[in-house]
């Protein structure tokens, strides 16, 4: 009886080992799971970065709607507007490009 039980456990262990090996080598098995797990990790990191960017942009929108100083800064930086009477000096670096 003990010999039969030992053979059954050996057979069971061999079957588990074969199934584990097949799962590891199957393109739709363990490798796919690991690839998808890494992709999920990258997506979570991207989502966290996008949430931070969205919060920053929402703060900027609120500032542009309510704060005249923020609006003036944005217009001067992005549209290069100047006030009447101001002088603009354009400096060129050694390569001929503007600064």
Image: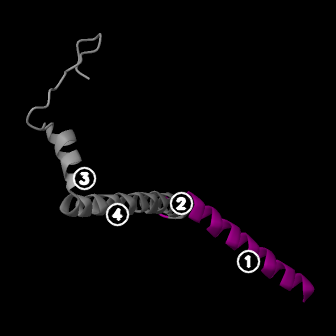
Give coordinates of residue 62: x percent, y percent. 25, 64
Which residues are the magenta region? 1-28
Give coordinates of residue 50: x percent, y percent. 36, 59
Label 3 sits on residue: 70
Marks 1 & 2, CB-CB < 8 Å contact: no
- Residue found farthest to the left: 84
- Residue found farthest to the bottom: 1
* Separation (CA) of disc 1 from disc 4: 55 Å
* Separation (CA) of disc 4 from disc 2: 32 Å
Marks 3 & 4, CB-CB < 8 Å contact: no
Front residue of 55/24: it is 55
Mark 1 or 4 closer to N-term? Answer: 1
Using residue 85 as the reference point, say whether residue 11 is left or right of it.
right
Q: Residue 87 appears in which quarter of the rendering?
A: top left
Main SS type for the magenta part?
helix
* Separation (CA) of disc 3 from disc 2: 47 Å
Q: Quadrant of the N terminus?
A: bottom right
Q: Is residue 81 above or below residue 89?
A: below
Looking at the rendered structure, which numbered label has been put on residue 12?
1
SS at mark 1 in the image: helix
Give coordinates of residue 46: x percent, y percent. 41, 57
Front residue of 4/81: it is 81
Is 56 in the magenta? no
* Separation (CA) of disc 3 from disc 4: 17 Å
Q: Quadrant of the C terminus?
A: top left
- Residue found farthest to the right: 2
Label 2 sits on residue: 34
Label 4 sits on residue: 55
Q: Residue at x 14, y 40 (%)?
A: 79
């Amino acid at each position: 009886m003990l010999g039969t039980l030992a053979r059954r456990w050996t057979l069971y262990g061999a079957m588990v080992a074969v199934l584990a090996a097949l799962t590891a080598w199957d393109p739709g098995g363990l490798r796919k799971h690991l690839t998808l797990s890494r992709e999920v990790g990258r997506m979570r990191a991207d989502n966290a970065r996008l949430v931070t960017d969205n919060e920053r942009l929402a703060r900027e929108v609120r500032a542009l709607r309510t704060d005249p100083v923020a609006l003036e800064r944005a217009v001067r930086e992005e549209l290069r507007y100047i006030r009447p009477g101001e002088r603009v000096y354009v400096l060129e670096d050694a390569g001929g490009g503007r600064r």
